[in-house]
Structure formats: structure tokens, C-alpha cells
Image: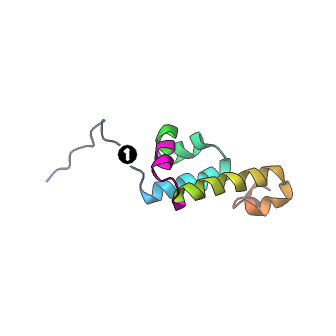
Amino acid sequence: MEQQPASPTARAHWTPARQRLFLTTLFECGSVARAARAAGMSPSSAHRLRRRLAGTAFDRDWSHALTLHARAMADPIAGHLHPHASARG
């Protein structure tokens, strides 16, 4: 049986893997737009997901990722908080 190609109107979904990638990237870059694109989703879709999951681990992890990113940017000595600090030299 031959598989049909995905229709152009097929919508991507926030799988657990996409959520993890989004949160990891959000921590690394601090940008919702960049993190959403890295996960193959739109920033507006990310914000809708967060509203839908308000009060859940995803919502808390989003806030935590931004807080840790801001701390790492404010205090270069705290670079150990960043998972790629050693790669940046």
C-alpha cells in the first residue's frame, strides 16, 4: 500500500519531543520565536499551548527556562547554568 504525502493543510502538533526541544532552546536563547521555530512550530502556537497548559509543568518550565537564561546572561560567572557554556570557550 502506497502512503499518501501529508496534505499541505495538515497541522503540526506539540508532541512531548517538540515541547522538550522548545523548552531546551528557550533556556539556551531566551527567545520564544527562536525556540518555537527550532521545534517546527510558530510563536503564536507556543503561546496558545502555554495558555492551554497554564499551571502545568510545561508552564512552570517555560518560566523557569526564561529565569535561568536571564540569570546566565546577567552573570557570566554563572555560565555553568548554561548547558553549552564550555562549548562557547
Q: Quadrant of the N terminus?
A: bottom left
Q: Quadrant of the C terminus?
A: bottom right
> Which kind of residue does numbered mark 1 sit on?
Ala
Residue 49 shown in magenta: yes
Residue placed under numbered mark 1 in the picture: 12
Along the viewing direction, whichever of 19 and 47 lies nearer the viewer: 47
Q: Tag 1's secondary structure?
A: loop
Q: Residues within 10 Å of mark 1 (few under 14, many from 20)?
A: few
Mostly what secondary structure, the magenta segment? helix
Residue 56 shown in magenta: yes
Along the viewing direction, whichever of 19 and 63 lies nearer the viewer: 63
* Residue 34 image-quadrant placement: top right
Residue at 67% across / 51% down in the picture? 66
- Which residues fall within the magenta stretch? 47-57
* Residue 12 image-quadrant placement: top left
The residue positioned farthest toward the left in the image shown: 1
